[in-house]
Amino acid sequence: MHVGLIIYGSLDALSGGYLYDRMLVRALEEAGHRVALFSLPWRSYPRHLADNWRLDWRARLLAAPVDLWLQDELNHPSLFWFNRTLRKRRPTPIVSIVHHLRSSEAHPRPLLHLYRQVERAYLASVDASLVNSHTTLSTVRALAPTHRPAHVAYPAADHLPAFPEIDAETIAARALLANRLRVLFVGNLIPRKGLHFLLDALAMVGEEIELTVVGSLDLSNDYTNLLRQKINTLHLHPQVRFVGRVDDATLVSLYRSHHVFAAPSYEGFGIAYLEAQRFGLPVIALTIGAAPEVVIDGYTGVLVKPGDSAAIAAALQRLNGDRSLLLAMGLAARLRYTLHPTWNENMNAAVRWLETIATCAAHRRPVLTNQG
């Protein structure tokens, strides 16, 4: 099977969504399929909308000898209209890889209306959806009700080079012997990730808790400047450390040396939540998005309402003051990770489903909905 994958930018980009796409490509190639990459440069949303009528882009896709199209849903503005032509001219099945919808994020009302309309049109233009969680599937179904096939293939966290794996004795020693509670945040420094709420919470708990932030610190970014101003205003310099982007080995070291992972953001899945639990870190996340599919509230972490910095602060203070609870949650978090399927298991199942989509299309047979 010859598969065409449409993305923005480079497949090597540092994000959970691109990691998912890379793992899917690897599974397809290991199964003997060929994957051709069709990439568009990152630009503004209006310019992406204009891609639908770019003659060179249209000609390239229409001429591509593929048996199955995979489209990262991130590319929806560049494809929402052109997919109609693609389906008419080339009756090749189109499968959207949906990590989370732009219209599920917080935006000003006029923009949110635009995003909903464009994403709804895009989802109506594809034949099936490969999604990363049942939460994401629900948002897709709510925006564009359809009986078209869908498959849930969870991400995993066994991609990090962690040898040896952390054990119960190490988790116990870390929880019981350290003086200051060390909190870790990993993510892109954008408003949706909620780091500003975490900083507000840190200001409420006192100097006995410290925070390490992993993520690119772009000094020209307005949100980065807001974070720096907040740190200055709240006098958090002694407690907050920015380490920028790090390689996998450094990230593993940071997971091993911290007590709690906190990322109060809306996520379609949240690979970092599972990564943290692999190393026995209780997770502080939100009650919305897919976090409840990954984090068991009260057992492997704490779920708080969006924007509730006081609840984050309360959770941090409780874990800092009750190290037995910190240990129990850490051990439960590690167990939660061990029970989660691996990348190979999840992506191989996704490949088998994609093979069924292509085979049924070739023989013009309907595909039964499979929600994973």
Image (cartoon, rainbow, N blue to C red):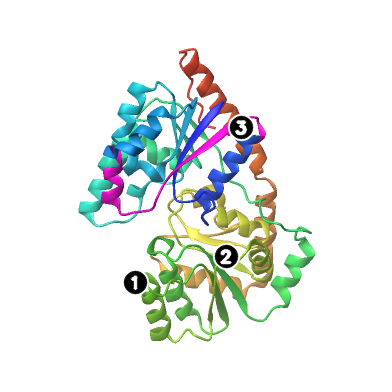
Mark 2 secondary-structure assignment: strand
User: Disc 3 and disc 2: Cα gap in Å?
Assistant: 30 Å
Q: Which residue is mark 3?
A: 349
Tag shown at residue 362: none
* Amino acid on which disc 3 is placed: Ala
The structure residue drawn at horizontal position 57% and vertical position 83%, both measured from the top left corner, is: 208
In the displayed structure, does residue 334 sit left or right of residue 223? right
Bin the neighbour count of mark 1 within 10 Å (Cα to Cα): few under 14, some 14-19, many 20 and up: few
Q: Give the mark nearest the N terminus, 2 or 1.
A: 1
Residues tagged 3 and 2 counted as in contact (Cβ below 8 A): no
- Nearer to us of marks 3 and 2 is 3
Q: Is residue 14 magenta?
A: no
Q: Secondary structure at mark 1?
A: helix
327 lies left or right of 116: right
Query: Is residue 129 placed above or below 246 in the rendered structure?
Result: above
- Give, as a three-letter code, the residue at label 2: Phe
Label 3 sits on a secondary structure element that is helix
Q: Amino acid at mark 1?
A: Asp
Location of mark 1 (residue): 222
Distance between the alpha carbons at the discs numbered 2 and 1 = 25 Å
Q: Is residue 292 above or below residue 196?
A: above
Q: Is residue 260 visible?
A: yes
Q: Residue placed at 40% from the left, 20% from the top?
A: 91
Q: Where on the picture, by quarter, is residue 307?
A: bottom left
Residue under label 2: 261
Residue 285 coordinates in the image, percent (x, y): 50, 59
Disc 3 from disc 1: Cα separation: 41 Å
Circle count: 3
In-front residue for pair 229/204:
229
